[in-house]
Amino acid sequence: MLKRIRVTVAVIIGNILDYYDFLLFAHFGPIITPYFFPNIDLKESHILSLFLFGGAFIIRPIGGIIFGYISDVFSRKKALLLAVQCAIFPALAIAFLPGNQRIGLVASCLFVIFRLMQGFSLGGEYTNAGTYLMEYHKSKRGFVSGCLAASGTIGSLIGLGASAICLSYQTEIPWLWRTAFLVGGLAAFWSFSMRRFLIDIVAKENAKKPTKKVHFDYLWLRRSLVIFIGVVVGTTNWLPATYTNFYVTKILNQPTAIGIYCTMISLVGYIILSPLMGILADKSKHHEYFMKMAALFIIPLSLFGFLFLREGHWYLTQILLVIASSSFGAAIHPVMNSLFPAQIRARNVSLFFTIGLSVGGMAPGMLSYIVDKTGWYLMPALFISLLALLMAFLFVAYEAKSSRNHLQLKNKLDENLRFKE
């Protein structure tokens, strides 16, 4: 029991630190974007920071397929160790990168490159950690999945606390934000040392027989399902963490402190609710059914949430959106990992989930721009509702095809038995 806890904690702490490094920019964006991209006003700086935040998601599928391949062909442990190693350099590089005033356009280009490197690292971190833990734990997978989902938010919350401190001393110590990236890079070394003692999981199929091409029914549908899971997770997670902050401070003209409180509610709420929703998913004994119902439940929650936001009740918006995101995201790992055989599991989950997450990660910047230019304040709710309906449709299609496939297999077995008789 203690060994399982130690292994789980080692994986989760690494995920916390990786997300801390990656999401620092989400909180520091309005502060440091003008440092590398000068000559833009405050609102444009905030929107640009959202696009830069989402842009790092574009590179995540590349990290997903590379680390997923390493995980399937070599071992889960090796992929997790390499992922955390790749997170060290960009965090330290950003901490010491000179600004635009000193080295000009080079600073802007290098900053974008380092952000992409962080996205590459995270592409191999989260999904491979989920695959590792789902294979390691034979029970309570919903709870473990919820804890893993919450761990990324814990990293973001630590980053939010660091940004709050830097905001308090921004005038006196303008370079203080650099120390947050420095601490993140150094902490990644500690995470690496903890993961060195992980049990080296290699899929049993790979350990006992050579790798061969795996034929799996409806592989395209399974991959599409994972993509849409990523889109829904990315959208429902990042909107309450970033978009509502933009809307409250730039559209409703509330103080920056209110924007931080707004983000704080979403992060703390997600940390608390995700493990609890995972427990409910375990009690339901059908993670797929739980996720399908959660997808449909997202629609009224998002519509009412953004109606409240328009009226200035941002705290109600955050509560509703966090319930929606945590209920859907808690059971994603047992569902996604059940869709593929072990020989191709990590690469398929990593690649197609991060493709969907990349689309979802771009949603805050895209929706902020649309709302700012058009005033269509319900656009985020309509976007989320459409995603939820498509997600539910894919679940129904997958279940229908799976049931038909099982029925055909049963009929074939019955015919063989009758023939033998």
Image (cartoon, grey):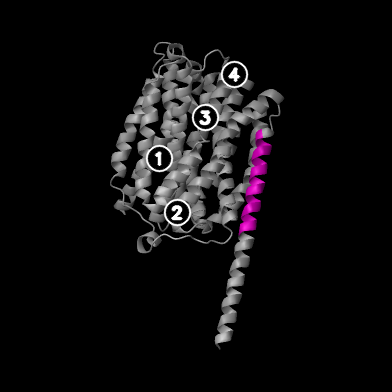
* Cα distance in 3D space between marks 3 and 2: 30 Å
Picture coordinates of residue 330, whole percent (x, y): 50, 47
Q: Looking at the image, tell me whether mark 4 or mark 3 is earlier in sequence order.
A: 4
> Which residue has dot 1 on it?
15
In the picture, which quadrant includes the N terminus? bottom left
> At 56% from the left edge and 51% from the top edge, which residue is drawn?
223
Q: CA gap, disc 3 to disc 1?
A: 18 Å
* Left or right, residue 104 beside residue 242: left
Please state which of the two labelled residues, at mark 4 or mark 3, is closer to the viewer. 3
Residue 147 visible in this rendered orientation of the protein: no
Q: Helix, strand or loop at disc 4?
A: helix
Q: Which residue is mark 2?
A: 141
Looking at the magenta stretch, what is its main secondary structure? helix
Residue 56 seen? yes
> How far apart, in angstroms, are the residues tagged by discs 4 and 1?
32 Å
Identify residue for label 3. 53
- Type of residue at label 4? Lys
Label 3: few (<14), some (14–19) or many (≥20) C-alpha neighbours in 10 Å: many
Q: Which secondary structure lies at badge 3?
A: helix
Q: Tag 2: residue type? A: Arg
The 10 Å Cα crowd at callout 4, few under 14, some 14 to 19, many 20 or more, is some
Residue under label 4: 43
* Among numbered discs 1 and 2, the one appearing first in the sequence: 1
Looking at the rendered structure, the kind of residue marked 1 is Asn
- Residue range highlighted in magenta: 380-398
Indicate whether 79 appears above or below 172: below
Percent of width and height locating residue 200: 32, 52
Q: Is residue 328 above or below residue 412?
A: above
The earlier-in-sequence mark between 4 and 1 is 1
User: 162 or 132, which lies in front?
Assistant: 132
Question: Which numbered disc flags the more N-terminal residue, 3 or 2?
Answer: 3
- 392 in the magenta segment: yes
